[in-house]
Structures are given as structure tokens and as C-alpha cells.
Image (cartoon, rainbow, N blue to C red):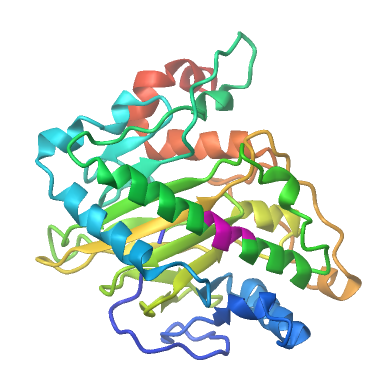
């Protein structure tokens, strides 16, 4: 489900980019949102431009401790260095909730296998005791799988997840203010039942020169996505002209992008932007950790009332035959999981797949 640019670590400009040859995305210093001495109007206008015109931006000033940002990559490298048997002990085919380890080539985007291996982690919750007729998406609630061979991964990941949630919630509150709403407008759906999600990912070098799909072009279906990427690069963002922008790694930053739920909520004033990951060259590996800010699974997105000047710039919700956007978040999330992980779908969700033809 997502992601970094083709190398380089030059600091991006504060302006917006439109050329497919550009290598910079907007940069937002989120500390200005909580700084009483900052020009709030100027900050919100810059954030609004970045989210409306590009849909992707870097965030600095987030305050996440360096020991966590370096620690999550350390445990990621240790996990993917474990013997295969230890990784397969937590393989996601063991989990109806799509949690755990996915082997390279076993997640699909756009119908083609992605060249990456990963560990999927959600909120730490028990599976529900469901009755006939309950919504199928409630089966997404359940426990994580943690590797017994690397016990420190759990504590480090959950600590990083908590910080990613804090930063994502702050960016969402800033976006609400930038859209003319109360800062807490979106808070209702982001309580302790929110459907957040972390992926710890390793991209091996491409198996052949022309096999470059690390992750195929797609959009994210939550509210916001946050990405911590290493210095290798590979994330590309589709520009308005159809070309691709490199989201080159910027030290100390997270990359943020708008998800489909915000597109629905703003009637397309904010648009979920297509993006992809190009595999690194043979012999090079890339690590990244995305965090997806999803609401409660029972959330139903309702359009907010934009100020007249912003409403005039709303582009409407995207209508794509192969990717219909659903306002009911649980259903939207379930469609994404079933499409991306066919092996898990066959083992645990056969009844749902059969009902949908």
C-alpha cells in the first residue's frame, strides 16, 4: 500500500512542483502549527496549497525522537535477516486480519505482484465474537503476529506506531483548520478503535533490469498516510501532467499523502494522488515504514461544508471503474485487503469472495 524517489537528499523547495522532471515536493514544518509566535494564516495557506495542488508533502518539525526513527529501521533489518522459518512462523496466511509476514511477490497492486517483503501490524486488539449478519469488515479486528525470535520488535514498533499516530493526528487537525473547520472536526472517528496500520517493508534489488515494480501505481484508502523512508529512494508521485515526481529522501522528514477518505470528505478539494515505488537496482535493498491513519471501521464519511472560495475549487470525487470509492470505511478497507492479498482471502474470506462473485 504505499510509498520513495530515485536517490539524493537535497532539501526540497517550499514551493509547489508541476513538471514531471522535478525532484521536489512541498515541505511543511508542522511545529509552526503549535507555535503561538508563528503566522498561522501563512502556515495554513501553505499546507492547504500542498494538500490541494499536490496531495503529497514532506513534514518536518514533528518531534519524533531520533532513537525511534533509527530504532524502527534497526529492528526492520534484524527481522528481515532472520532465517526464513522464523519469518514464516508469522506469515500472514495464518491471520484472518491480514497481519504478519508477506513473502516477496505475494501482495498484488493493479493485479501484478509487488517486489517486496513486509510485516503488517495493526492495533493490538482481540478478535470479536461475531454473530450471523454482522458486517464482514468486523472480522478485520484482531491480534497481531509477533516473531518469537525477535522480541524487541514489538516494543519498538508499537512505540513508533504511537508517535506516527500523534504526528498524523496533528497534521489532520492542521488540515481541518486549513479547510475552514474546527481543528477537532475529524476527531470523532479517531478514538481508541481507529483502524491504524503499519507496514515494515524491505525492497530487494530488482530480479531483472526491466522488473521495476516495487509497488504498482495506486492510491491509499484511509485519511492520511505517513512514510519513513531510508536514503535509497524509489517513491514516485504522479503529477497533473501524468509524469512522475521523485519523492527523494529528505533527512529527518516524513512523507505525507492524502487518502481517499479525505477526497470523499472534501468532495475532491483534496485528492488522493496515485503513487508507486520503483524497485532499487540489483544488489541494493531499500527499507521503509509507512503508517496509515484510518478511522474507526464503522466510520461513514460525510462531506464537510467548505468555505465558498474553497468549494469552488473542489474537483468532485474520482470515478474509476477499477477503484470505486466507498464512503463506508470498513467496506472500503476490506475491498483493499481482499484485492491485495489473494492467498489470505482464499483461506479466510472465501464466503465473502463468493458472495461478491
Please tell me whether residue 158 is drawn above or below residue 168 in the rendered image.
above
Which stretch did the figure color magenta?
Answer: 165-169
Identify which residue, 207 or 180, lies in the foreground: 180
Q: Residue at x 88, y 69 (%)?
A: 307
- The secondary structure that dominates the magenta segment is helix
Q: Is residue 41 above or below residue 58?
A: below
Q: Is residue 109 above or below residue 67?
A: above
Q: Is residue 291 above or below residue 120?
A: below
Question: Is 56 on the left-hand or right-hand side of 199?
Answer: right
Q: Quadrant of residue 311 in the image?
A: bottom right
Question: Where residue 250 sits in the image (x, y, percent)?
Answer: 39, 80
Which residue appears at 59% of the width and 39% of the height?
332
- Residue 152 in view of the camera: yes
* Location of residue 169 in the rendering, given as x and y in whole percent from the top left corner: 62, 58
Left or right of 208: which side holds 194?
A: right
Camera-side residue of 188 and 208 = 188
Q: How many marks?
A: 0
The picture places residue 107, in percent across and down from the top left corner, at 32, 42
Extreme-top residue of the structure: 132
| Residue shown at the point (86%, 76%) measured from the top left | 309
Q: Nearer the viewer, residue 11 or 52?
A: 11
Amino acid at each position: 500500500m504505499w510509498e520513495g524517489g530515485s536517490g539524493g537528499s537535497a532539501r526540497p523547495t517550499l514551493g509547489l512542483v508541476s513538471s514531471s522532471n522535478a525532484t521536489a515536493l512541498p515541505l511543511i514544518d508542522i511545529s509552526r502549527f503549535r507555535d503561538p509566535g508563528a503566522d498561522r494564516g501563512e502556515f495554513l495557506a501553505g499546507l492547504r496549497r500542498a494538500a490541494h495542488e499536490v496531495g503529497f508533502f514532506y513534514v518536518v518539525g514533528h518531534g519524533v525522537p531520533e532513537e525511534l526513527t533509527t530504532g524502527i529501521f534497526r529492528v526492520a533489518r534484524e527481522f528481515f535477516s532472520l532465517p526464513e522459518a522464523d519469518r514464516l512462523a508469522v506469515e500472514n496466511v495464518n491471520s484472518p486480519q491480514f497481519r504478519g509476514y508477506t513473502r516477496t511477490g505475494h501482495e498484488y497492486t493493479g493485479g501484478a505482484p509487488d517486489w517486496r517483503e513486509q510485516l503488517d501490524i495493526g492495533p493490538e486488539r482481540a478478535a470479536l465474537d461475531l454473530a450471523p449478519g454482522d458486517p464482514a469488515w468486523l472480522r478485520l479486528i484482531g491480534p497481531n503476529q509477533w516473531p518469537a525470535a525477535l522480541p524487541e520488535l514489538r516494543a519498538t514498533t508499537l512505540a513508533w506506531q504511537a508517535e506516527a499516530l500523534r504526528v498524523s493526528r496533528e497534521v489532520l487537525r492542521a488540515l481541518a483548520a486549513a479547510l475552514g473547520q474546527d481543528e477537532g472536526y475529524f476527531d470523532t472517528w479517531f478514538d481508541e478503535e481507529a483502524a491504524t496500520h503499519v507496514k515494515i517493508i524491505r525492497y530487494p534489488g530488482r530480479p531483472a533490469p526491466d522488473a521495476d515494480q516495487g509497488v504498482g501505481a495506486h492510491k491509499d484508502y484511509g485519511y492520511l498516510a505517513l512514510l519513513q523512508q531510508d536514503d535509497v529512494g524509489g517513491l514516485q508521485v504522479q503529477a497533473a501532467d501524468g509524469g512522475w515526481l521523485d519523492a527523494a529522501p529528505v533527512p529527518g522528514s516524513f512523507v505525507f499523502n492524502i487518502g481517499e477518505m479525505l477526497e470523499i470528505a472534501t468532495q475532491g478539494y483534496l485528492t488522493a494522488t496515485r503513487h508507486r515505488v520503483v524497485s532499487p537496482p540489483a544488489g541494493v535493498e531499500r527499507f521503509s515504514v509507512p503508517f496509515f491513519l484510518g478511522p474507526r471501521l464503522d466510520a461513514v464519511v460525510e462531506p464537510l461544508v467548505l468555505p465558498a472560495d474553497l468549494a469552488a475549487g473542489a474537483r468532485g470525487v474520482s470515478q474509476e471503474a477499477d477503484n470505486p470509492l466507498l464512503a463506508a470505511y470498513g467496506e472500503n478497507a476490506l475491498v483493499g485487503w481482499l484485492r491485495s492479498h489473494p492467498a489470505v482471502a482464499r483461506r479466510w474470506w472465501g464466503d465473502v469472495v463468493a458472495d461478491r462473485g
